[in-house]
Image (tube, grey):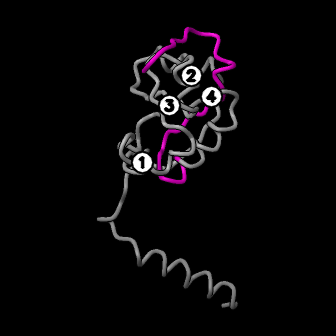
Amino acid sequence: MGRFALVLLLAVFALASGCSSNEIISDQQISVAAYRKITAEQAKEIIDGDEPFIVLDVRTDAEFREYRIDGAVLIPHFEIKERAPNELPDKDTLILIYCLRGARSYEAAKELVNMGYTKVYDFGGIADWVYETVSGGA
């Protein structure tokens, strides 16, 4: 038996010996953190659908009060790391994230994924949102 074949056989044996039939994990038990870039139109379809979601605005408080998507939650992008664990406790909730033009939402989305959030959908900026918005105090 060649050296490569022996090493391969030992590697397979080592991997197989670490698993037992009691350790089988179904696809439903595995949650993988993921970032997805979507359009405003796709975000609107999700909002109008039946799946639970959170719309997350990562702009400043002043921008949020000026105008926002109805029902959006405000966590400024520079506060994501500190506030998300308390304000977004379920890491498997679908999060639709936006800012003004898309740069801050991208950075905040990457941070959420790094924190283990599994369904982060960045639809860029409210500047591209052609649908209804609200203004005033939250």
Q: Tell me if residue 3 comes above or below residue 137 in the rendering.
A: below
Does the stretch in magenta take in 135?
yes
SS for callout 2: helix
Which residue lies at the image location 41% right of the left edge and 78% below the top edge?
17
Label 1 to label 4, Cα distance in Å?
Answer: 27 Å
Indicate which disc residue 123 carries.
Answer: 4
Q: Which residues are magenta?
A: 112-138
Q: Tell me if residue 118 comes above or below residue 132 in the rendering.
A: below
Say which residue label 2 marks. 43
Mark 1: amino acid:
Asp
- Asked if the residue at tag 4 contacts the one at tag 1, i.e. Cβ–Cβ closer than 8 Å, the answer is no
How many numbered circles does the render carry?
A: 4
Q: Quadrant of the N terminus?
A: bottom right
Image quarter for residue 103? Answer: top right
Say which residue label 1 marks. 27
Image quarter for residue 19? Answer: bottom left
- Asked if the residue at tag 2 contacts the one at tag 3, i.e. Cβ–Cβ closer than 8 Å, the answer is no
